């Protein structure tokens, strides 16, 4: 017997600290001035390229981002540092990803009227894991009092939807009864804050999605009608950090490629058509007309990107409420973005309404989840 999986609760952990574009640009420009002064001779000799300043106008126009939340702003905004300063934790206390993820998960459980011990699968699906092992998901399982088993998975910005597919398939097959997909994203850790081409892109957050059998739901739910995942290799978004770092020449040096790198223009041009077609193919396979969608909760990387995708899917510019953006407040939070949009902008849907969650990013990867509201 197969079971219909349903989303019965979501939760968002939002860090307490924000960085506005004005604060970000002031810190970057102070860093750039400092760099240029320190390297004045080499710059004059043409050996080093001078750093150009950043601007608030460019950031808003190019991305739609107005501010971002972070776990630590002091380190990021220190022109002599330019990355977060996090306290060292002992091995006997929960890690920072567990702390953030558990907060989001408790909110998701509360919305569904459930407790940790009701859950028998925890997937920690995120772009980066704070350590190699033991799995962050297993620490989350312990912290939340969940039973069963837990594992980590990483599909960059698509981690949440790929995690939802994995959990939904297991619920459908009966191998688990209730699953939490948790996405703690500390993007401030992998962002290169010293590069003006990308220093404005990311923010920190954690999201959680509780998935159970539709028959078990205590309140309103979103049935997961179907999921679709796709990948296609690309070097246009890449980070070379990894466990072999110290074994390679200059591996532990302060290298640009050990943080997030992207060819933003190419990403924009290649990913927009890929995602638009992916969604149209997914809907066609399910016999759903695009006009039947009440809402699109898209990955939150860039406002124009979302505008293009929405237009391709609906055949007309989407109304703001049909395709809510949260990136102006949160920036790109990797896999968590589409789940924040879903969590904050889905309670108003009515009985039978259809919607689609879609994430996309490095890999390339794209994942979509077709859902139907039941009250
Ligand atoms: N302030 C001022 N000017 C800046 C700047 C900044 N912070 N950063 C770059 N510029 C300049 C560039 O140097 C360039 O100058 P040039 O024309 O003289 O060469 C110009 O502004 C345009 O830069 P470009 O990088 O081509 O801008 P863009 O319009 O492509 O926007 C992104 C950049 C990153 C916002 C955009 O490409 C994007 O969102 N891409 C997809 C990103 C994405 O989704 N990534 C997924 C990550 S998971």
Image: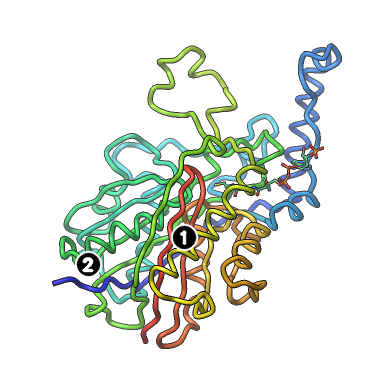
Task: Identify the image quadrant of the C terminus.
Answer: bottom left
Query: Marks 2 and 1, Cα distance to the nearest angstrom?
Result: 28 Å
* Neighbours of disc 2 within 10 Å: few (<14), some (14-19), many (20+): some
Give the x, y percent position of residue 28: 73, 38
| Image position of 33 (left or right of 276) | right
On screen, residue 264 above or below 253: below
Q: Nearer the viewer, residue 266 or 75?
A: 266
Q: Nearer the viewer, residue 11 or 372?
A: 372
Tell which quarter ligand 1 is in. top right
Residue 13 — which label? 1
- Look at mark 2 in the image and give the residue it sits on: 172
Residue 74 — which label? none
Identify which residue is drawn at 36% across, 72% down.
9
* Neighbours of disc 1 within 10 Å: few (<14), some (14-19), many (20+): many
| Image position of 240 (left or right of 211) | right
Give the x, y percent position of residue 55: 80, 45
Between tags 2 and 1, which lies in front? 2
Give the x, y percent position of residue 35: 75, 25
The structure's colour scheme is: rainbow
């Amino acid at each position: 017997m197969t079971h219909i999986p349903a989303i019965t609760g979501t939760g968002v952990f939002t860090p307490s600290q924000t960085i506005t574009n004005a604060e970000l640009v002031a810190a970057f420009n102070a860093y750039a001035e400092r760099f240029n002064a320190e390297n004045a001779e080499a710059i004059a000799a043409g050996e080093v390229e001078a750093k150009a300043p950043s601007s608030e106008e460019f950031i808003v126009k190019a991305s739609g981002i107005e501010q971002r939340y972070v776990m630590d702003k002091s380190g990021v905004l220190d022109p002599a540092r330019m990355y977060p300063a996090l306290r060292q934790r002992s091995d006997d206390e929960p890690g920072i990803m567990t702390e953030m993820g558990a907060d989001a998960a408790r909110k998701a459980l509360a919305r569904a009227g459930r407790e940790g011990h009701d859950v028998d699968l925890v997937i920690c699906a995120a772009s980066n894991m704070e350590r190699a092992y033991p799995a962050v998901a297993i620490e989350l399982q312990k912290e939340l009092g969940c039973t069963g088993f837990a594992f980590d998975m990483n599909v960059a910005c698509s981690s949440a939807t790929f995690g939802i597919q994995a959990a939904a398939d297991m619920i459908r097959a009966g191998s688990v009864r209730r699953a939490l997909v948790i996405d703690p994203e500390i993007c401030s850790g992998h962002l290169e804050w010293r590069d003006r081409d990308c220093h404005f892109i990311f923010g920190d957050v954690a999201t959680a999605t509780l998935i159970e059998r539709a028959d078990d739901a205590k309140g309103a739910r979103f049935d997961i009608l179907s999921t679709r995942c796709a990948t296609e290799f690309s070097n246009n978004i890449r980070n070379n950090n990894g466990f072999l770092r110290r074994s390679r020449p200059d591996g532990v040096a302060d290298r640009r490629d050990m943080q997030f790198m992207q060819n933003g223009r190419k990403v924009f041009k290649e990913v927009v058509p890929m995602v638009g077609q992916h969604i149209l193919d997914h809907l066609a396979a399910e016999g759903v007309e695009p006009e039947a969608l009440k809402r699109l909760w898209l990955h939150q990387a860039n406002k124009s990107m979302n505008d293009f995708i929405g237009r391709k899917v609906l055949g007309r510019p989407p109304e703001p409420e049909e395709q809510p953006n949260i990136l102006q407040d949160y920036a790109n939070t990797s896999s968590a973005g589409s789940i924040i949009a879903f969590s904050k902008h889905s309670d108003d849907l009515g009985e039978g309404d259809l919607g689609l969650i879609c994430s996309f990013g490095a890999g390339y990867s794209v994942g979509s989840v077709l859902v139907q509201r039941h009250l």
